[in-house]
Image (cartoon, rainbow, N blue to C red):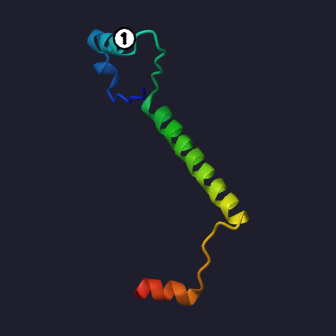
Amino acid sequence: MYATYHLKADELNADVIQTLKDAYRQREIVILPKDEYDEWEKERHNAAFTGKLRKSIQELDEGKGIVKTMAELRAMENG
């Protein structure tokens, strides 16, 4: 399970903590400041993009790409 809770430090109270404890029982919980979370998200998305890019390059190397001439592309654009 993955969830993101956004709240300010002064909103973190006993009720919120109890809700988290009830929701996650014995599982580990990670709490990050927003700037660190944003950096983590950026790196996670970059890693996903890099993986997709590598897969695309591999598919091209394996001859799985679609080849179009400029004339064909222009015809599709005007189509």
Numbered label tally? 1
Give the x, y percent position of residue 7: 32, 27
Q: Which residue is mark 1?
A: 21
Image quadrant holding the N terminus, namely: top left
Q: Residue at x 34, y 30 (%)?
A: 6
- Residue in the foreground of this view, choosing between 26 and 59: 59
In the rendered structure, which amino acid carries the disc numbered 1?
A: Lys
Q: Is residue 26 left or right of residue 9?
A: right
Image quadrant holding the C terminus, namely: bottom left
Q: Secondary structure at mark 1?
A: helix
Give the x, y percent position of residue 37: 47, 33
Classify 34 as above or below 46: above
Q: Residue at x 32, y 26 (%)?
A: 8
Give the x, y percent position of residue 31: 45, 22
- Residue in the foreground of this view, choosing between 47 and 77: 77
Give the x, y percent position of residue 57: 67, 61
- Residue in the foreground of this view, choosing between 36 and 43: 43
Q: Is residue 16 left or right of residue 47?
A: left
Q: Residue at x 49, y 87 (%)?
A: 74
Q: What is the quadrant of residue 64 in the picture?
A: bottom right
Q: Is residue 54 left or right of residue 34?
A: right
Q: What is the quadrant of residue 43 in the picture?
A: top right
The extreme right residue here reads: 61
Classify 59 as above or below 78: above
